[in-house]
Amino acid sequence: MLNNGVFPDNFTYPFLLKACSGPCSLKVVQMVHTQMIKLGFFGDIFVPNSLIDSYCNFGVIGVSSARKLFVFMEDRDIVSWNSLIRGLVKGGNLKDARQLFDEMPEKDAVSWNIMLDGYVKAKDMDAAFQLFEKMPERNVVSWYTMVSGYTKAGDLDMARLLFDKMPVKNLVSWTIIISGYAGNGFTKEAISLYNEMESLGLKFDDGTIISILAACAESGLLTLGKRVRSAIVATGFRCSVAVNNALIDMYAKCGCAEKALVVFQGMSERDLVSWNTIIQGLAMHGDGVTTLKLFSRMKKVVFDLINSLSLVSYVLALTWVMLTRVLIIFILWKGIMTLSPK
DNA sequence: GTAGGGTTAG
């Protein structure tokens, strides 16, 4: 763009910074920051705010840069505060986050929810609940945060209590509570709520399926996993790669390695997760020979993507195959020894 | 520009 003589404006940088939020290095954000100072776009509050947000993706160092920027800013709006608090919360610095939260001249629903999420992530449900009770207004996000927080803390009674009190229940609320019960091994409740959701005629989406299947995988809940699978088939739901991956994992973790393999083989598109999931699933519960064959196929297809997880599964499968072979040889040898005349 | 259920590893 610059080479073509086109100059950036105040809309360019927020977009550019958004693109730097991934595995992009902190140095690039710093470079963009320097250029922004030179060209002077800080008059538009969106610009420094998106810079704060970008810095906050880079751990403690990033957050301290965000903080410096925040301090030097002439004008700040709620988003500036919220973004920095989010950065502190993300870095686990709840004390400073809370201090800023209390200092804020004005709070909106996002401010409250960020702080709430901080306590939930820190597994401090008591502090979260206290804040939740103090909130001047609660929106769906506040309720999601609390209910999913309690399910993650294993307190299904509180999760259920709040779920029942939710003023508006939608697909996400149902997903959270069903996955919560399923993931914690409460089979009966999970299935009964799933039935209830179905009877309400709610149309599930990728998020619902993936979340429930992951919870089933976690606690080996094959019954519900199968129910979700038949619902997918019955409704003709078009499975994304992620949904199929979740299915593979659910089957493998519930002890159905063959079914996991069937799903994998039926996929028209696969990603690294598909390969890792099937290889891991088979290495744990299936046969080692198939795992090794799949691994060598994987080497041809996604060689540059192979990571430590694939390697661990490979070594596991290899060890398993070797052990089985040694065992077979040992048994044969014992047999020959007992049969041979003394 | 900031918050929310979401596939492998833990």
Image (cartoon, coloured by chain):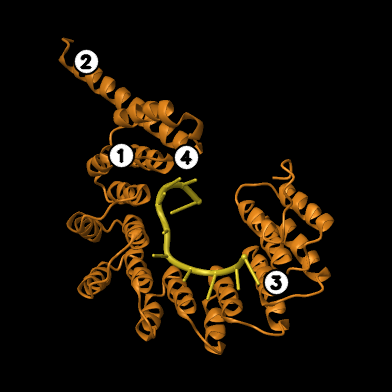
Chain colours: A orange, B yellow
Whether residue A288 is visible:
yes
For the residues labelled 2 and 1, say whether their Cβ atoms are less than 8 Å apart. no
Q: Look at mark 3 in the image and give the residue it sits on.
A: A80
Q: Earlier in the sequence, mark 3 or mark 1?
A: 3
A244 w.r.t. A103: above or below? above
For the residues carrying marks 4 and 1, which lies nearer the camera in this image? Answer: 1
Q: Residues within 10 Å of mark 3 (few under 14, many from 20)?
A: many
Same chain for labels 2 and 3? Say yes or no: yes
A213 w.r.t. A275: above or below? below
For the residues labelled 3 and 1, say whether their Cβ atoms are less than 8 Å apart. no
For the residues labelled 4 and 3, say whether their Cβ atoms are less than 8 Å apart. no
Same chain for labels 4 and 3? Say yes or no: yes
Query: Which amino acid is tagged 4?
Result: Leu
Q: Residues within 10 Å of mark 1 (few under 14, many from 20)?
A: few
Residue at point 68% right, 85% down?
A106
Residue at point 42% right, 43% down?
A273
Q: Look at mark 2 in the image and give the residue it sits on.
A: A337
- Indicate left or right for A41 with A216 as reference: right
Q: How far apart, in angstroms, are the residues tagged by discs 3 and 1? A: 44 Å
Task: Count the numbered circles shown.
Answer: 4
Q: Chain of mark 2?
A: A
Q: Earlier in the sequence, mark 4 or mark 1?
A: 1
Residue A181 locus on image (x, y percent): 33, 69
Query: Which amino acid is tagged 2?
Result: Met
Q: Look at mark 4 in the image and give the residue it sits on.
A: A309
In this view of the protein, which residue sits in the foreground, A211 or A317? A211
Q: How far apart, in angstroms, are the residues tagged by discs 4 and 1? A: 23 Å
Q: Look at mark 1 in the image and give the residue it sits on.
A: A268
Q: Chain of mark 3?
A: A
Q: Chain of mark 4?
A: A
For label 2, the SS is helix
Q: Chain of mark 1?
A: A
